[in-house]
Each structure stands twice: as C-alpha cells, then as structure tokens.
Image (tube, rainbow, N blue to C red):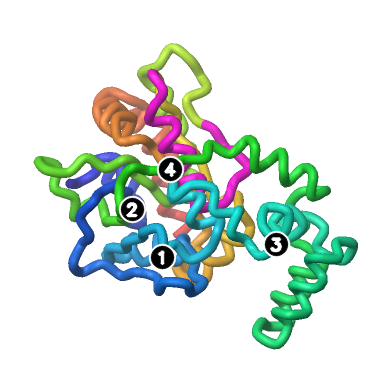
Amino acid sequence: MKSRIAEVLALKHEPVAILLTDEKPGNAIQLKEGKFGCVMAMLAAAVRGRQAVFDRKTFGCPGGGTGLGFGNQYRNFPGGEQGFCHFLSIGVTEWEPGRRLAELAKPFIGKETYDTIIHGEGFLRTPELVGKFLECLPMTNVSSKYVVFRPLIQVDSEKENPATVVFLADMDQLSALVVLAGYGRECNESVIIPMAAGCQSIGIYPFREASRERPRAVIGLVDISARIQIKRQLKDDVMSFAVPFTMFHEMEANIPGSFLEKNSWIELMKLKTKEV
C-alpha cells in the first residue's frame, strides 16, 4: 500500500502500519522473552523495511507492553506500580522497598541505570502524580495475539486492515500533517499531543481514537527516552504522527485541492531544498 501523503510530503522515512493479528509473520524480528528491549528501536527497524512482531511475552519493557495494548504491564515493574511511580519521578531514596530492590539489582545493571533508579527520571514531580498519570492512560487489552509493525508499502490493501499508520516527520512535514488532519473537518482540534511514552503515542492512544466517531491523530516522541532511541537508530530529528486507519484514508482523500497544491506549501518546499 502506497501513501500519497508520504509522496507529497517527501517523507524520508517509510510510514509504518500497526496491525493487530493472530497470525505471526514468518520473517519478522522479535524481542526475546524476558529480555529488555525498546519498542522504538523496533519502529526504527520497521521504517527501514523490516517487520517486527510483539506478543504478551516479548514486548521489551512494562511501558512497551502497556503502550502496545497488552494491558497494564506496570503492575509487573520491579516493585509494582509503586516502583514505577518512584522510578518516573523522584527515585527510591526515600522508599525503603525500592532501595532494597536497587541494591539487589546493582551487581547486574550499569552505573547509569542504577543512578536513575536511585534518583528517578524526573518526568513528574512526585510518585503520586505518576499514579494520576497511570490513571489517565487509556489502558487497553487488545484481543489479538500479536501486534505487528509493518512498512506500509508491504501492507496488502485487499486483505489487511491496519489499526494505525505512523508517520515520522520533521517540523515542516509535521505542520502539514496537522493542517491536513483538520482540512475537511468542522473543528480545529483534530490532533492531540499527550504526555506519554513513545510507544503509547503510536499504540494505545491512537487505538482509543479509532473508537471515536471523529478520531484524532496523535503526535508523539515527546518522550525523552524514546527520542534518544530514535536518534541513535535513525540519526534524525523527527516526531511521530499516528492516525487510526480510517483517518489515514480521510487524510489521503483530502490531498487534491488542498494547501499541498498551493503556493505557500510549494514556497516552503523551495526554501527547504535551499537549506539542504
């Protein structure tokens, strides 16, 4: 399946379809059971042409499992949800159970990881606020056995119906995607930017939007840790833009006659070419 949006915007990276399926692709890469891995690294592999598959035992980390729709995996974080609440905020210095866990893990983890566990990531001010953050997440339990990342160009439009399409875009391209998302609508809030993990912004948030009468697109990669992964893998400065599949078709159909064929966009693209 080709994307006219990707062509018109001259996207550097191939869009990725996320499929919910009970059939495991035979040639897909997969994280090892019980081993840490990052969903965003798998997304980077997919934009390069590989397929990636996840199931309830191979999602890499609790945030990844949650983001892909395998339920609330933060319950399985070391120390449970309380452990995660401390990890994302202030660390375990003032939480005795967490300090004990950190000391037990210290011989098996690097200094940087240990320091992060002790002092926290600082993404929210208190563990209590992280708890509220978890309450706000659209926790999802997908009915399918597998979640698959597949380059959109490899999707068979006659047989397959992806849940989500993910674009990776620079700032000019992202602005165009936002405008195109609202081009044929009676409102000006067709896109959201939740504070969320990178995998949640391409998974459970657009999964939730797909159930709405008027689904919205979801901008992601505001997650600092996810940005590190993408920069390491793709050597690029991009944001993610995830749309439910019905909205993808809506946006594709809205290209003819839109701003993408008008002077302002053409002029912006000329300036972009000069910068290169």
SS class of the residue under badge 4? loop
Instruction: List x then y, in percent, for residue 228.
Output: 58, 65
Q: Which residue in the rendered view is the most extreme toward the top? A: 186
Tell me the distance, in whole angstroms, between the alpha carbons under discs 3 and 2. Answer: 27 Å
Left or right: 85 with respect to 146? Answer: right
Residue 239 visible here: no
Instruction: List x then y, in percent, for residue 189.
Output: 52, 22
For label 4, the crowd category at 10 Å Cα-Cα, with few meaning under 14, some 14 to 19 and many 20 or more, is few
Looking at the image, tell me whether mark 3 or mark 2 is earlier in sequence order.
3
For label 2, the crowd category at 10 Å Cα-Cα, with few meaning under 14, some 14 to 19 and many 20 or more, is many
Which span is picked out in magenta? 192-213
SS class of the residue under badge 1? loop
**Residue receiving disc 3:** 79
**Residue receiving disc 2:** 147
Residue 180 occupies quadrant = top left
Residue lying at 41% horizontally and 28% vertically, measured from the top left: 181
- What residue type is disc 3 on? Gly
Looking at the image, tell me whether mark 4 or mark 3 is earlier in sequence order.
3
Badge nearest the viewer, 4 or 2: 4
**Residue receiving disc 1:** 58
